[in-house]
Image (spheres, helix red, strand yellow):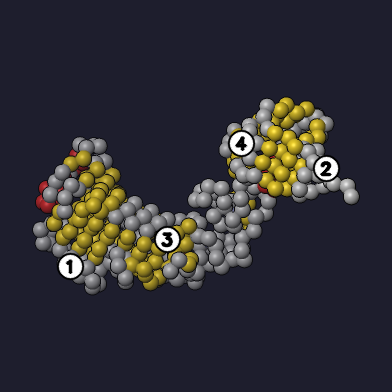
């Protein structure tokens, strides 16, 4: 049945989830399913089970027990709602230290009372979704481990401490602000979300000009390195952490460069590469193409405008630059381009200016 999506209800679902031949299967709910009172689901198949409840609810009334037990197995929840209507029960119990539960989305709703949404003796990974309501989120026993890189939680108790359960670079966030953790803190009140850390308690991260930003110890995510690479993943051309702007993309490997890196690369990096502009540049210093540098500058529709006293681009002897694409190179007061090496112009408009004499 591997790879097959199956429609089942109630007792049939219980039987199928626990059946050995269903290793690797994905179960997709096509309607709400209510389990008979006292009935829990067990994933005993010894393989990877995926449960996708879509927009539906899987509910049960499991007193002092879990709606779903993950034992020596792994279960992934993709979406939908799991609800245990008994106040003493929980939604998902990872009941053996060999069990693994991965939550990528969906909502876990334990009824008010003592039970948590997830009780963990094994391991849990949460990348998204909603884990319980206030005071009833995630409970990790001493053998339990977690890796959190998303999701919101009613609360969290971690017997071995909270900082060890955050994925690298992530922090707990409440009311839109990352929460500073104390050493060995084991509990955090909800509602609390796990988000990518912006390192708010450090001195403001500064662009160091070499593709990294500086960082002092962060109390929210525990990061204490002196520097880390810019993070272009969320805002594409602006570093999520320090706000540095990417101005060019270096091919063939696609590295994004800040303006300081663009300057340094053109000046010193010998090799065959293409720099594609991603923004207009307004400059007070000339761009220098260094000796022995061979490169292509693709204007990509952008303008390099030099407002200082010198030329916009200056190339040293033994350099070899190709400029292509539509775009403009302007010097308000001097030459647009001064070539001592070789320049091949395949595109661009070049405008020089001259200081007006009085
Ligand atoms: Zn941080
Ligand atoms: Zn940065």
Local crowd size for mark 1, using a 10 Å CA cut-off: few (<14), some (14–19), many (≥20): many
Residue 15 placed where, x, y %?
14, 48
C-alpha gap between disc 1 and disc 3: 27 Å
Residue 154 in which image quadrant: bottom left
Question: Are the residues flagged by discs 2 and 4 in contact, CB closer than 8 Å?
Answer: no
Classify mark 2: helix, strand or loop.
loop
Classify mark 3: helix, strand or loop.
strand
Quarter of the figure that contains the N terminus: top left
Question: Are the residues flagged by discs 4 and 3 in contact, CB closer than 8 Å?
Answer: no
Left or right, residue 184 beside residue 346 = left
The mark closer to the camera, 1 or 2, is: 2
Residue 23 placed where, x, y %?
24, 41
C-alpha gap between disc 4 and disc 3: 38 Å
Q: Which residue is mark 3?
A: 194
- Vertical side of 320 occupied by 99: above or below: below
The mark closer to the camera, 3 or 2, is: 2
Marking on residue 300:
4
């Amino acid at each position: 049945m591997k790879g097959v999506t199956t429609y089942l209800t109630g007792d049939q679902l219980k039987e199928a989830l626990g059946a050995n031949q269903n290793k690797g299967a994905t179960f997709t709910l096509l309607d709400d399913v209510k389990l008979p009172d006292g009935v829990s689901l067990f994933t005993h198949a010894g393989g990877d089970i995926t449960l996708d409840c879509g927009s539906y609810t899987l509910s049960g009334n499991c007193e002092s027990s879990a709606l779903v037990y993950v034992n020596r197995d792994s279960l992934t929840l993709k979406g939908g709602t799991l609800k245990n209507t008994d106040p003493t029960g929980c939604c998902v119990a990872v009941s053996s230290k060999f069990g693994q539960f991965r939550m990528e989305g969906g909502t876990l709703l334990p009824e008010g009372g003592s039970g948590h949404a997830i009780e963990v003796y094994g391991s849990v990974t949460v990348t998204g979704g909603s884990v319980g309501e206030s005071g009833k989120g995630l409970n990790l026993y001493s053998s339990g481990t977690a890796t959190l890189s998303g999701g919101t939680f009613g609360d969290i108790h971690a017997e071995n401490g909270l900082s060890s359960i955050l994925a690298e670079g992530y922090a707990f966030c409440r009311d839109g602000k990352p929460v500073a953790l104390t050493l060995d803190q084991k509990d955090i009140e909800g509602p609390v979300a796990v988000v990518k850390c912006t390192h708010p308690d450090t001195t403001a991260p500064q662009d160091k000009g070499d593709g990294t930003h500086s960082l002092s110890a962060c109390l929210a995510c525990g990061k204490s390195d002196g520097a880390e690479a810019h993070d272009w993943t969320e805002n594409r051309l602006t570093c999520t952490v320090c706000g540095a702007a990417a101005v060019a993309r270096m091919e063939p490997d696609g590295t994004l460069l800040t303006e300081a890196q663009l300057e340094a690369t053109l000046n010193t990096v010998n090799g065959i590469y293409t720099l594609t502009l991603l923004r207009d540049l307004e400059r007070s210093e000339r761009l220098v193409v260094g000796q022995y540098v061979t490169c292509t500058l693709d204007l990509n529709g952008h303008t390099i405008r030099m407002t200082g006293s010198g030329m916009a681009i200056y190339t040293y002897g033994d350099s070899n630059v190709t400029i292509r694409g539509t775009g403009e190179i302007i010097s308000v007061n001097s030459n647009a381009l001064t070539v001592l090496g070789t320049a091949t112009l395949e595109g661009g408009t070049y405008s020089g200016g001259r200081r007006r004499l009085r």
